[in-house]
Every structure is written in structure tokens, then in C-alpha cells.
Amino acid sequence: MAMTLYELAGADPAQRFSPYCWRTRFALAHKGLEVEAAPWRFTEGHRLAFSGQALVPVLVDGDTVLSDSWAIAEWLEAHHPQPSLFRGAAATTRFINAWADAVLHPALARLILLDVHDCLAPADQAYFRTSREARFGQTLEAVQAGRDQDVHAFRKILQPLRMTLAAQPWLGGEAPGYADYIVLGSLQWARCVSEFRLLAKDDPVFGWRTRGFALFGGLAMAAKGYEP
Amino acid sequence: MAMTLYELAGADPAQRFSPYCWRTRFALAHKGLEVEAAPWRFTEGHRLAFSGQALVPVLVDGDTVLSDSWAIAEWLEAHHPQPSLFRGAAATTRFINAWADAVLHPALARLILLDVHDCLAPADQAYFRTSREARFGQTLEAVQAGRDQDVHAFRKILQPLRMTLAAQPWLGGEAPGYADYIVLGSLQWARCVSEFRLLAKDDPVFGWRTRGFALFGGLAMAAKGYEP
């Protein structure tokens, strides 16, 4: 029986943009595992009650119920060892995971916050506006209005990524690994909701993203979204 | 025959503060390798001419001459495999190396720039002042004068480190690895030249640094410097 992945969706259930869900999507594809998607919305916390918490991704495999993208990746690695997601590098990949959560996402959110809002179902829009405007201390419109300037700070934040990719084709080394899927998931978040141009075409990160979005038969590009 | 490590020194040749040299110091200790230290100063580029470049660390092992801390670490790993520095995680450790270079060091430099200057030999002081004031666009005194404020931004930058260390004892996982030595080297740079208090005592990074500085019989704490 295929696993089920609960993942965040927009008003259009085909619009799946959560960076955390994309980490799991890429990890499942890496393992060659089939999954049935169950679209879920911000205001449907009750539908995840069986998981003992209220956030996606949630992965269900028979009697096993897993939440938290990192815990899911570790479980997949333990139960489906080949091909390896981490190839011995889980500990240092965790730093990249923390960097994406703590540094990359807040900077990226400033560029696409209103676009995320605009793709949500009406009930989710109300929740999203209230919670995010409290977090940013500004209206969604005001946050995103600064993006033509903020994108420069965002691109600067990518510098460690750029330096790493100058030395090797993937964050995981010679082949992609979970470190790549973490950051590709973040960039896919933006692609799914926004036309905004995140990267300059001559940025090495641009070329890496193109290669990453083409993995697994174009998994990322097949999802509803915009030209990156 | 022991290897020779050319490393940056202050006016007092016992004062060795380069974060890049400390990466190599820790890596050599991890491998259990003996090394003879050759103190070197900023204005002695000619003494490194044999290495084909002008920066430390330079490691000499018989006929082999190596420069660049990352290249040295890779060479040590290839020629002295056990105990492993990377344990399979070289590719993702490279991201942490880039993060330290591109993000951690510029923020840390603002807190200790004048203190670095003050420990240098006179000829090095003139070089250091000219080159660093051009880079920062301010006098050394002006840069460091803001450190009581700048330290808050610095501590915020450590957030991915803090999140990683909340989940595992070392950046390398259950045991220290090169990822730890990179960041410990950065913090040791500060300890060697400055009394300034970088970390709050209740910061998980503080406890990790204490454990890291105690490694290899207290290698880091045995070097000339201040109470961290």
C-alpha cells in the first residue's frame, strides 16, 4: 500500500508550496517510494489530530504516523536505506536544515509573503494574514512592497551556498542528497506561489536550482507554479 | 620527521590566533599527528614563497607543501584516514566552512578588530590597519566601538549552530569532527586576542565551546589568550 503524505495546499488543491513538504517529497522520490498526496490547509488542524500535532508534512505508512520533515527523513533513511539520503552526513546536514529554517526562510518570506496569501483558500487567508502580520509587525502588502530592495539581502544570504557550489556540483557532493532537497524545497516554495525573480541568471545557484528542479523526471517543475 | 605548520603569530610569537590555522591545528590533533610550529607574520609573505602563495596555514610534510586549510584537511584525511575528520560528511562540511568564512568571520571581526591589531608586531600593525580600514570603510577603533551593540547581531548569526547543538552534542554528530573544528577555530581566534565576552553563559554554544576547547588535552586553552 502506498504511503500517504499530508501536505499544505492552496485554494487550488494542486498548488503545493510548503518548503517542509517539499523536503519530504524530494526524499520520497530519492528513495523511489510511491506516495499518495492528501492536500491539507492551514485551518484544518483537526484533520491532523491523529498525528498528535498540527503541522504538515505528516507521512502515514500503515500504522506508522510521522510528522516533522527531519524526523521523516531520518525514518525513511532507517527503513529504506538505499539509495542513501545522507551518505554519512546527517549530522552536518542538520546544520543546513537549521540554516534554511532560521536564515533562509525569514529572508525569502519577505519576498513572497503576499503571493503566498493570494494563493490560499479564503479561510486560510484570514489565518495567514493575522498570524504573519503579527510576526512581521507589518501588513503583508508592506512586507512584500520592499522586495526589489530586499532581494539583494536575500542573494547575499546565499553566499555560503554559492561558495559550496563553486567547489562541487551538489550540496551533497558528487550527487544530490538531503542537503540539496532542503534548499531546493525552499526555492520551490517561492516558485509555486510567485513570479518574482529570486536569482540572477548568472548566479551559480541558478544553475544548481535548474538541475535540482529537473531531478526525478522534473518532479519540482511538474508541480503548479511559475517559471523560476 | 614531524611536519611543519606555518601559522600566523602576534608580536609575541606564542600568540597564534588565525582561525584558519586553528582549523589545521585541530585537524592535526584529531589525527594524532605531531607538528612543529613555525610562527609567521602578515608582512613575511616572502617566507612562504616556496608554497607558491602568500597565506597561512602552510603545512610541510617532507617534500609535500600544502596551503589552504580546506585542502590541508582533505590531504590529511586522504593520507591519514583514521580517525576520520569527516566521517563521510566532507561535502556538507564544506557548506559550514563557507558559512564560517562568509558569515561568521565578518560579524566576529567587528567585535575584535582592534584587539587583533593590538597584539600584532609593529610592521604587521601598519599593514593590518591599512588593509582592514579599507575593507570596513572605518577606522579599527570605530568598528570595534560598536561591539556592545554588534554582539547581538553576532549572537543571532549563531542561531543555526544553536539549533543544531540542541539536537546533537557536536556539529559532527556524536563525536567532534572537522565541522566542529572550523567553528571552534573561529571562536578561538577571538579568545586568543580579546577579553570581549562573545557568548552568554546560558547559550548552548557556550557549553559546546567549553567542551571543544577542552579537546586533545585542552589544546585550545593551552594557547595564549583570555578566559572565553
Image (tube, coloured by chain):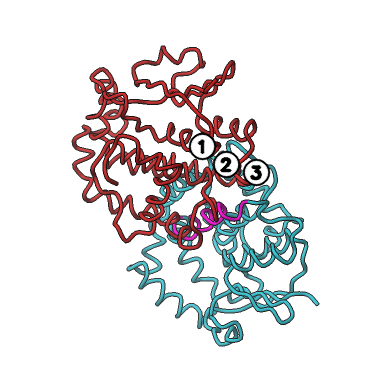
Chain colours: A cyan, B red
Q: Are marks 1 and 2 in contact (CB under 8 Å)?
A: yes
Please state which amino acid type lies under the numbered disc 1. Answer: Ala
Q: Would you name the residue on which mark 2 appears?
A: B85
Magenta stretch holds residue A97:
yes
Magenta segment boundaries in residue numbering: A89-103
Image spot of residue B104 (x, y percent): 39, 44
Image spot of residue A143 (x, y percent): 38, 62
Circle 1 chain: B
Q: Residue at x 55, y 30 (%)?
A: B72
Assign a secondary structure to mark 3.
loop
Circle 2 chain: B
Cα distance in 3D space between marks 1 and 2? 7 Å
Badge nearest the viewer, 1 or 3: 1
Q: Is residue B223 visible to us here?
A: yes
Circle 3 chain: A
Image spot of residue A222 (x, y percent): 71, 61
